[in-house]
Image (cartoon, rainbow, N blue to C red):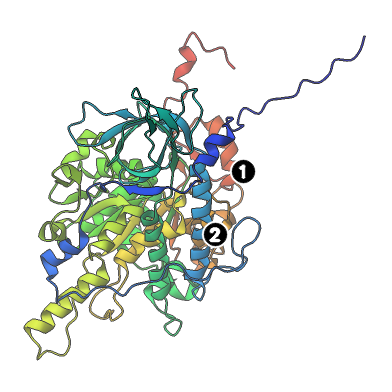
Amino acid sequence: MAPKKDTPSLDVYASPYVPLALKSFNQRSAAIVRSHTARGVDYQAYVRSFAGTDILASPPETHPHLTATTHDQNGSQTKTVSPQNYAYHFRDALACEAEALQHECDEYSLYQVPLLFAARDPRPFMYWLQVPGLRETSLRIENGDIVKLRQLHFGPRGELLDAPFLMYNAQGGVVTSPYVNAEYHSVVWGIDRLNERLTLRVDWLEQMSMQFNVYFTVQAGRSGALHRAVVDAGQSMPLAVQSSWMRSMLFPEPSDGAMQKSLNKGTIGWDARDPLLNYEQIRAIDNVLGRDYGTVPYIISGPPGTGKTKTLVELALQLISGKPDAHLLVCAPSDPAADILTKRLRQHLSPKELLRLNATSRSFPEVPMNILPFCYVDTDMFSIPPFRQMMRYQIVVTTCRDAEMLLQARMSNMDLSLLEQNMQSALHPERDEFSPLLHWTGLLMDEAAQATEPEACIPLCVVALPHDFDSTSQTAPIFVKAGDQNQLGPRTASKGQAIQTSLFERLLQRPIYSEHPLARTKQSGGVMRPLTQAMLPILRPPFANLIRNYRSHPAILATPSALFYSDTLEPEAKNTDSLLAWKGWKGR
């Protein structure tokens, strides 16, 4: 009997077959027909509403498209990032990311699909487009994005036409078939992920054949915020000024820290809002409140279930307690993570004290109902509150990327300081010196290991110090990050190390954290090494290691504890044996 031949395996991830005629149709030259853009914030008008046209000058224009440097095969730069090459390093990485994002968008192109008139939509020129897979959020698309449409035309036998064809009318005359050679730049006005449907505005659409080729594009404005952030961060690290605040936040050195000459005190001077805080969480909060660890980022690290968000929320409440001049920017990489922060803070703060700042592109169904009172809505979209109202909030919660709204609205520490100085100079020109108070006194970032470094730079530029900051009269803003580099990292389209390594992870590799005797990687024997008198003096640790896990069964926790956390995790979850009485449990 002859041996059975191997059956060729099929790739379940193979791209669907698309006729070449349909693919090549998108490459033909066509007239561009643009549609009305979605509503957004007019930032120039917003700034004029509180600064007029003379007090706050336009910011200097940055040039995001610098000459790219050499890439390796994975699209990352070969040089290590430093204060000297910061802007070029990430500009190059972001260019690779944009290319990869466009390739990702190309994979979601649709061919010969129908566009349906949105009959129940009261807005004009609205159409519905079904997008398979939209529910999984794999396609990165937002309200206001451009979706390109190519209208298809077919002949009498169903063949695809690339030009009008001739036909005879009843009177025997020759006429040409209806044909529009156009590329419609439609605008996303609504996203229904549950039903996998986009609402598109398409102006001047000739409703002949309603079959279209659809392809998605990377929006320049979205990547432009990241470009501007790395440029501004790089310009805030002048080489001649080694003690600049931005440099110490992005490249902290042991000299930026502070020495500890005595053991920690056994008591705290504040009343906890959360009575369930454990020792490590209390110690982390007390260290930040004392601000005696130097001018460096304070890092709170811990695996899932150790209470990082709980610690950050308590810290935020303590930082503003009894301090009317304290204003915090609290960020997370994603909208759901920022919503969780808002949900926990809302239990202690009123809508006059807490703002959940949403991008104008976010739709109302995406926002949990219990945090809507803490959002600002202008007519039918999320927006930024008026200036006077904005200045009153003690805590503003937003995503790292949406913090760009504050930069566009000139709400950064640099811009607000310049505004106050110019106003004071206009009112009292005889005064030579004036030192305005900082508005933003701190930046707290949750799930920080999931944000790319350019994303983290956006809120960092909001709280960055003015160039003429007087450190003798007031203290610099704090920067606290909570996360875990062993969990999910940044979601990127390219695979370059520069874009895939978060600022959280890169900072932990700095000697001030990685070489500290109390660092988690320096522990052994399954026990966190305590600080003893014999170790003094020592650099005060600008970090906290959370070790008590409240989520996992001890047997489940043992493996990641040994593999990733130097065997330092302690199981604290309750009722982990509650399923033993379940009849379906077979001991497997």
Q: CA distance from mark 2 to mark 1?
A: 25 Å
Question: In the rendered image, which quarter contains the N terminus?
Answer: top right
Mark 2 surroundings: few (<14), some (14-19) or many (≥20) residues within 10 A: many
* Residue 345 makes an appearance in the image: yes
* Of 357 and 540, the residue lying toward us: 357
The kind of secondary structure element at disc 1 is helix
Query: Please, which residue is most extreme toward the left here?
Result: 427
**Place of residue 372 in the rendered image (x, y in percent of width and height, measured from the top left):** 19, 39
| Residue 562 image point, x, y percent | 60, 42
Left or right of 487, for residue 62? left
Nearer to the camera, 286 or 316: 316
- Kindly identify the residue that appears in the image at 42 percent across and 66 percent down: 230
* Mark 2 vs mark 1: in front: 2
Element under label 2? helix
Quadrant into which the C terminus falls: top right
Residue 521, how many percent across, how many down?
58, 55
Residue visible at 41% across and 83% down in the picture: 241
Q: Is residue 270 visible?
A: no
Task: Please say if 20 is above or below 96.
Answer: above
Q: Is residue 438 left or right of residue 5?
A: left
Residue at position x 16%, y 61% in the image: 46
Q: Please say if 451 is above or below 380.
A: below
Few, some or many residues within 10 Å of mark 1 (<14, 14–19, 20+): few
> Residue at coordinates 19% horizontally, 80% vertically from top-left?
435
Numbered mark located on residue 563 in the image: 1
Type of the residue with mark 2 = Ala
What's the residue type where badge 1 is placed? Leu
For this rendering, which residue is in front, 214 or 260? 214
Dot label at residue 498: 2
Image mark for residue 405: none
Residue 480, image quadrant:
bottom left
- Choose the circle earlier in sequence order: 2 or 1: 2
